Image (tube, rainbow, N blue to C red):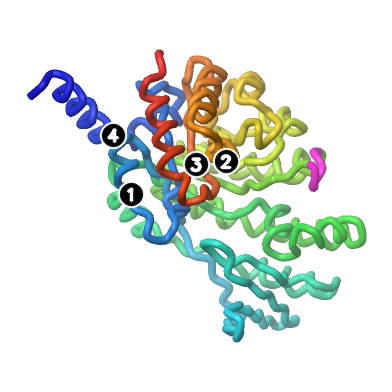
């Protein structure tokens, strides 16, 4: 075999044989793998997309899986399929009925009508929340770890923090802002009910086989206000973090928005890692700023989505700049946590992978 071809074959074999799970775990433990891991949410692959060629180039998988099922034994839930393809959910409780409506959007269904529409609905939703139980599905999680093998890392996905759960699941973002102004007392009462209920969840997850746990995220400080993040959301991170740390597990949050007003809150929290952190040009805090503000946190970034659409050289330079700002690379990972137009996936991810593999240490 020609020497050049032989070397390329050896390099290809080394990349293909990488143990991505070990590399990711090393980075999450604060170490620095030889090559910075680049992960891709396995749930983001478009229908029919084959990730194998990118995996052969060095792309790892990030697989968020649950360790529990949620049950509400005293709530009757009815699903009604609407003629337009939407799905209506009817929740019947001893204290009343609420409904929601979801429509297909991209790869999943998105709510277009939330359960809380009037002040009276809070009482019904609070009953649902207090009735919620968490059934362990540990064998499922172990099976997913075995299935993924060394191709990536399975991490435990859980739920939104109580305040974010109210915003996203029960009210909707726009109406949530009005509710904070008009019915803040009802919002906070529901918040306390969810806080109490989540203590049951903490125990189930702490006893599970998961070692890294994601709790909440999608926090938009401009909408909530940094004081609410500090006073209502961070205490939940800390309560869950204390329980997980007792069992030797780590907690992270999916903080993918403009984090400049909550840098101190995150720094002072018990979060072990920040996942989906998105640097400029898409969000306001750079990798260098985050590394300086959170020296004790592992940083698992989302490669800025807008850059995937840029010319090849711009993608390469953006990757190099992120690596430069990461410093010693300890506790640092890259990821893709947002949709990429299918026509750009192979091109952009290939460039990022090649750049990471050729980065000088």
Marks 4 and 3, the one that precedes in the sequence: 4
Q: Nearer the viewer, residue 290 or 298?
A: 290
Is-magenta flag for residue 328? no
Q: Residue 262's spot in the image, x, y percent?
A: 74, 33
Real-space Cα separation, disc 3 to disc 1, in angstroms? 20 Å
Real-space Cα separation, disc 1 to disc 2, in angstroms? 28 Å
Q: Which residue position holds label 2?
A: 305
Going by the picture, which residue comes out furthest to the front?
Answer: 311
Helix, strand or loop status at disc 3 = strand
Residue extent of the magenta highlight: 222-226
Q: Which mark is residue 145?
A: 1
Marks 2 and 4, the one that precedes in the sequence: 4
Q: Give the residue drawn at x 28%, y 39%.
A: 56
Q: Residue 17's spot in the image, x, y percent?
A: 23, 34
Marks 1 and 2, the one that precedes in the sequence: 1
Q: Which residue position holds label 4?
A: 19
Q: Give the residue drawn at x 28%, y 45%.
A: 149
Helix, strand or loop status at disc 2 = helix
Q: Which mark is residue 228?
A: none
Helix, strand or loop status at disc 1 = helix
Q: Residue 311's spot in the image, x, y percent?
A: 52, 33
Between circles 4 and 3, the one closer to the viewer is: 3
Quadrant of the image for the C terminus? top left
> Horizontal placement of 347 versus 236: left or right?
left
The quarter of the displayed image where residue 7 is located: top left
């Amino acid at each position: 075999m020609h020497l050049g071809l032989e070397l390329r074959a050896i390099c290809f074999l080394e990349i293909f044989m990488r143990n991505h799970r070990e590399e990711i775990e090393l980075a999450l433990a604060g170490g620095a793998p030889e090559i910075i891991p680049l992960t891709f949410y396995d749930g983001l692959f478009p229908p029919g997309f084959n990730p194998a060629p990118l995996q052969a180039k060095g792309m790892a998988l990030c697989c968020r899986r649950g360790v529990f099922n949620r049950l509400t034994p005293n709530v009757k839930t009815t699903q009604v399929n609407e003629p337009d393809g939407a799905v209506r959910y009817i929740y019947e409780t001893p204290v009343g009925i609420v409904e929601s409506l979801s429509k297909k959007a991209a790869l999943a269904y998105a709510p277009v009508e939330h359960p809380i529409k009037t002040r009276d609905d809070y009482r019904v939703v609070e009953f649902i929340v207090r009735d919620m139980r968490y059934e362990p599905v540990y064998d499922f999680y172990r099976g997913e770890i075995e299935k993924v093998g060394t191709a990536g890392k399975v991490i435990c996905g859980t739920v939104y923090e109580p305040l974010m759960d109210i915003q996203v699941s029960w009210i909707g973002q726009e109406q949530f802002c009005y509710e904070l102004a008009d019915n803040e007392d009802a919002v906070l009462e529901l918040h306390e009910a969810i806080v109490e209920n989540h203590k049951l969840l903490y125990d189930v997850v702490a006893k599970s086989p998961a070692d890294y746990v994601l709790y909440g995220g999608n926090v938009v400080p401009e909408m909530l206000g940094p004081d609410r993040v500090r006073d209502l959301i961070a205490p939940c991170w800390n309560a869950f973090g204390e329980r997980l740390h007792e069992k030797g597990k780590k907690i992270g949050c999916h903080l993918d928005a403009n984090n400049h007003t909550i840098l101190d809150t995150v720094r002072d929290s018990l979060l072990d890692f920040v996942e989906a952190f998105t640097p400029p040009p898409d969000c306001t805090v750079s990798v260098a700023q985050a590394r300086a503000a959170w020296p004790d946190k592992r940083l698992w970034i989302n490669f800025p989505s807008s850059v995937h659409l840029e010319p090849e050289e711009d993608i390469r330079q953006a990757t190099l700049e992120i690596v430069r700002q990461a410093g010693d690379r300890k506790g640092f990972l890259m990821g893709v946590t947002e949709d990429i137009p299918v026509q750009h996936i192979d091109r952009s991810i290939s460039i990022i992978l090649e750049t990471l593999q050729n980065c000088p240490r």
